[in-house]
Image (cartoon, coloured by chain):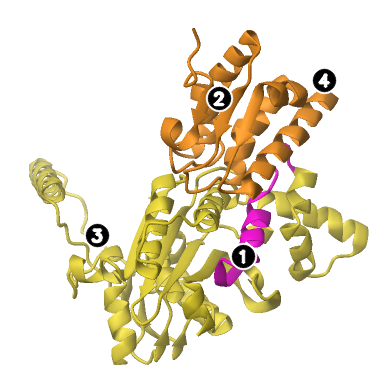
Amino acid sequence: MRKIFRSEAQRHRSAKRAQAELKARARHKARLARRPDKPPIQAPRPSSSKARKFVNVEAPANFSLVDNPIGVIAYFSKVHDILSSRRPATFDLRAVQTMTPDAIALLVASVNSTWFKKGSRVAGNKPLDAKAALMFDQSGFWDHVSSRRSLISQGEKKNLLLHRVTRNKVENVEAMNAGKLAVSHIFKDGRRIRPLYEVLIECMANTNNHADAQGKRGLYDWWLFVYNDPDRNRSVFTFLDLGVGVFRSLPVRSFIRDAMQRVGMRSNLDLLPKLFAGEISSRTLQEERGKGIPRIHEHARGGTFTRFVMITNDVYTDMTTGNSFILGEPFHGTAFCFDLESPKAAAA
Amino acid sequence: MMSNRDRSIVIATDFTEAPGARYIADGPKSGEEFLRELLEPKFRAAMEGGWRLSVDLDGTWGYASSFISGAFGELARKFGAPTVLKHLAIKSNEDSIVLENVLTEIASEGNKARKDA
């Protein structure tokens, strides 16, 4: 996907860089011409990933992380494997029939992740299905990939999907704006929904503090997507990072090591109750006492949200229903997907 | 003469309606920033003057656990829970849970500080 520069400043920088590179090449050529002992003719370079053919990877028809986690995670894992072997890959979405915002969020996060791409190139297309294609276009996906395509005007997509990426910080204003966007869509007023705001700040803080395996702060980007469903009084939130995931974060790993020795714990599912009760980090940390995920869980169970799913490492858990299971293939990172809906609409 | 304004903090208007996380390094409007800029200076004045500082939690979008810990928990760690509770009057008409969370934080962190000492 090619990068195009939209702002004047970017174009100016790009032009200056190109000029400088041209001059440097000319100087180098002139130096070589002056040298009596010209260097030997170089052997042709081995084919780079640029010269290699793109591997087409067909996405599952149900392109939804919350509804088809196993299929979607396996899909991204397959693409990641191809890219890791230095071959370029195409996200082929043509056969997608159903698409949810969380999968688009994951797609955007992945194609913007150096860890995911491993220096290889990616390309993609959009679903042939009209409804899925419309959502894809309106999602603002094209704004977050370096593409020449921009199929829909900013005004048209303004209230449909908000994309945000920030680096290494808890962004209070972003959380507030996301809340305002959803509230204006669902309730048509300016009310404050505290659980929503608090969940968003806790998610950002969780990524900032725990997304790295060694406990270094602020290494991973987070992505926040708000999709205002045009057919319902519903906003769908996706918050994700491609860090190490909750169960591979430093405090939880330390706890797992202890627990395995003491009680023979077998699965990450066994840890969920302790994680939600805030018992894990309080045993292992001094200041960061791990109240973030317990607080998220408390709000997820509090009736504000109609659905609240956390996917991290090999665990899928719907916090609203308590339904949890182990994923066949692990998710590299942490995703929170939750729906906010007006009570009237939820009851209908 | 100390005015009512000097004896109170309304977080939404005096600090922000969108409180952030724990540390200044975490991002804007953190608990640490609130503690340094507003809470601790006014709390010290309240201690020295022998009166109670009123802190109004209403009017914001909400409080992350880390903000509460970074501001009120840290204050309790510094001065101890009894002193903090003596000179601080926390109020919230909008959200009884946040009020409870702040008071619990002060009590638990204050006790921890006493044990450490």
Q: Residue at x 75, y 26 (%)?
A: B81
Q: CA distance from mark 4 to mark 1?
A: 38 Å
**Color of chain B here?**
orange
Using the rendered image, report if marks 1 and 2 lie on a common chain: no
According to the picture, the residue beneath numbered tag 4 turns out to be B117
Using the rendered image, report if marks 4 and 2 lie on a common chain: yes
In this rendering, which labeled residue sits more in front, label 2 or label 3?
2
Range drawn in magenta = A285-311
User: In the structure shown, which secondary structural element does the residue marked by tag 3 occupy?
Assistant: loop
- Chain drawn in yellow: A
According to the picture, the residue beneath numbered tag 2 turns out to be B39
Chain letter of mark 2 equals: B
According to the picture, the residue beneath numbered tag 3 turns out to be A42
- Amino acid carrying label 1: it is Ala
Q: CA distance from mark 4 to mark 2?
A: 23 Å
Near-viewer residue (A134 or A55): A134
- Amino acid carrying label 4: it is Ala
Label 2: few (<14), some (14–19) or many (≥20) C-alpha neighbours in 10 Å: many
- Amino acid carrying label 3: it is Gln
Residue A338 point in image, percent of width and height:
52, 69
User: In the structure shown, which secondary structural element does the residue marked by tag 1 occupy?
Assistant: helix
Q: How many marks?
A: 4
Using the rendered image, report if marks 4 and 3 lie on a common chain: no
Chain letter of mark 3 equals: A
Q: Is residue A140 left or right of residue A283?
A: left
Label 1: few (<14), some (14–19) or many (≥20) C-alpha neighbours in 10 Å: many
According to the picture, the residue beneath numbered tag 1 turns out to be A300
User: In the structure shown, which secondary structural element does the residue marked by tag 2 occupy?
Assistant: helix
